[in-house]
């Protein structure tokens, strides 16, 4: 049991959800033992075969409607896949990206033909997805992207470069954010659906060497006159891309906040175990009042974070989660995660700086949460606009 013992929220108190959680946990135990995950860390990416195994086991597309090959669940089932992955320390597997960020674009915005063509393959693991938003020198300002997708006969030619793309080495289905009208900002953006196999002019750059998240591949992508047919504009209409992106970012940011809340709990759990067993000056580290006060403070705020995140999930399930609240969750919980992990590492002393201790890995992995999904400075701007 975690030191942050928040009661199971009502929306998760369902026997079917509990059965699914048990099955997902057993899948991770069998197919992602730590020896295999360690190999992913060494390689810097998850092997392609694991995606097929996850697809066969029903972990992909869990909230995709059954008519498109999905499992007909909802966001609660997505939560289970993400939560069990964290509990079993399955690094690198971008299930949250695939299930809760990219597939919803196709489900909610795709044409009927696009849904029938792509969703079954994304559910089975035949296709692994990525979304190419960020560009060198642009960062969070999506309206300023320079990648173009310009009309050419019965399709479009994509030209440009993307960077910091999660799943960039593995993905064979990429949602490319591009300008179909370079003269416009938001109104000129479209989302282009690209299958990479056989795509002339598409090139993967180097796998980027990060300070954390060792098993998750992050890459540069290059597009040199890459052709996509006209029917590969998401939704079938140009100029809707920015609004499609904005419509899904609240869920993406909530997923980041969920991960941060779990990260807080794991950091506290390993630290309490450490300080109650490590001795100094004739007593355990826990026996010092400073240790107790630090951890009491972190538990109090970590509990508040979990309750806030659960409330956001409840709102999302009702279709009531707004942009500003999602931004608050992403901003505040990731900032808290960084503080918690830093203070927990301090309580480990020198051991906290050694990679064999879990807190060292948490320290490296947690830093990105304040940046991706929109930097926390952007989150503050979104919150301010709602005031």
Image (cartoon, rainbow, N blue to C red):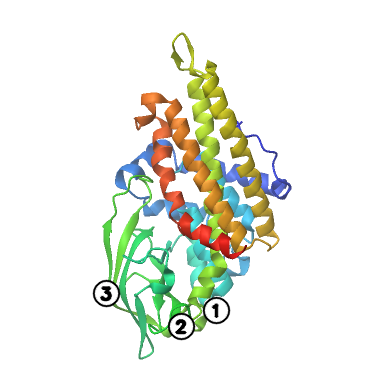
Secondary structure under tag 1 reads loop
Q: Which residue: 59% across, 51% down?
A: 79
Callouts 2 and 1 close, C-beta under 8 Å: yes
Residue 168 x, y percent position in the rendering: 35, 60
Quarter holding residue 8: top right
Left or right of 30 in this view: 321: right
**Disc 2 to disc 3, C-alpha distance:** 19 Å
Q: Is residue 349 above or below residue 168?
A: above
**Which residue is denoted by mark 1 in the rendering?**
111
Quarter holding residue 325: bottom right
- Outermost residue to the top: 282
**Disc 2 to disc 1, C-alpha distance:** 9 Å
Residue 190 x, y percent position in the rendering: 45, 78
Residue 158 x, y percent position in the rendering: 33, 78
| Whether residue 189 can be seen here | yes
Secondary structure under tag 2 reads helix
**Which residue is denoted by mark 3 in the rendering?**
201
Secondary structure under tag 3 reads loop
């Amino acid at each position: 049991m975690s030191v942050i013992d928040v009661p199971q929220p009502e929306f998760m108190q369902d026997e079917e959800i509990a059965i699914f959680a048990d099955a997902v946990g057993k899948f991770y135990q069998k197919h992602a033992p730590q020896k295999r995950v360690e190999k992913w860390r060494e390689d810097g990416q998850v092997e392609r075969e694991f995606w097929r195994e996850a697809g066969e086991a029903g972990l992909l597309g869990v909230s995709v409607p059954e008519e498109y090959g999905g499992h007909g669940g909802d966001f609660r089932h997505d939560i289970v896949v993400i939560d069990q992955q964290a509990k079993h320390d399955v690094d690198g597997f971008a299930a949250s990206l695939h299930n809760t960020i990219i597939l919803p674009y196709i489900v909610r915005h795709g044409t009927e033909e696009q849904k029938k063509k792509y969703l079954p393959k994304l559910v089975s693991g035949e296709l692994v997805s990525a979304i190419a938003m960020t560009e060198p020198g642009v960062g969070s300002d999506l309206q300023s992207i320079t990648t173009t997708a310009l009309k050419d006969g019965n399709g479009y030619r994509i030209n440009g470069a993307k960077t910091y793309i999660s799943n960039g080495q593995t993905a064979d289905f990429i949602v490319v954010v591009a300008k179909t009208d370079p003269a416009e900002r938001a109104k000129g953006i479209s989302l282009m659906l690209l299958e990479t196999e056989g795509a002339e002019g598409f090139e993967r750059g180097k796998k980027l060497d990060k300070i954390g998240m060792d098993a998750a591949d992050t890459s540069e992508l290059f597009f040199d006159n890459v052709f996509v047919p006209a029917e590969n504009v998401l939704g079938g209409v140009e100029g809707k891309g920015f609004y499609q992106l904005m419509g899904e970012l609240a869920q993406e940011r909530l997923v980041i906040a969920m991960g941060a809340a779990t990260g807080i709990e794991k950091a506290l759990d390993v630290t309490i175990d450490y300080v109650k067993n490590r001795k100094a000056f004739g007593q355990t580290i826990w026996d010092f009042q400073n240790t107790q006060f630090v951890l009491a403070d972190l538990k109090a705020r970590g509990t508040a974070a979990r309750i806030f995140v659960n409330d956001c999930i409840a709102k999302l399930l009702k279709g009531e989660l707004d942009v500003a609240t999602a931004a608050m969750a992403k901003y505040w919980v990731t900032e808290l995660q960084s503080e918690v992990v830093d203070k927990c590492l301090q309580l480990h002393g020198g051991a906290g700086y050694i990679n064999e201790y879990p807190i060292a890995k948490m320290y490296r992995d947690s830093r990105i949460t304040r940046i991706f999904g929109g930097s926390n400075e952007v989150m503050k701007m979104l919150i301010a606009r709602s005031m």
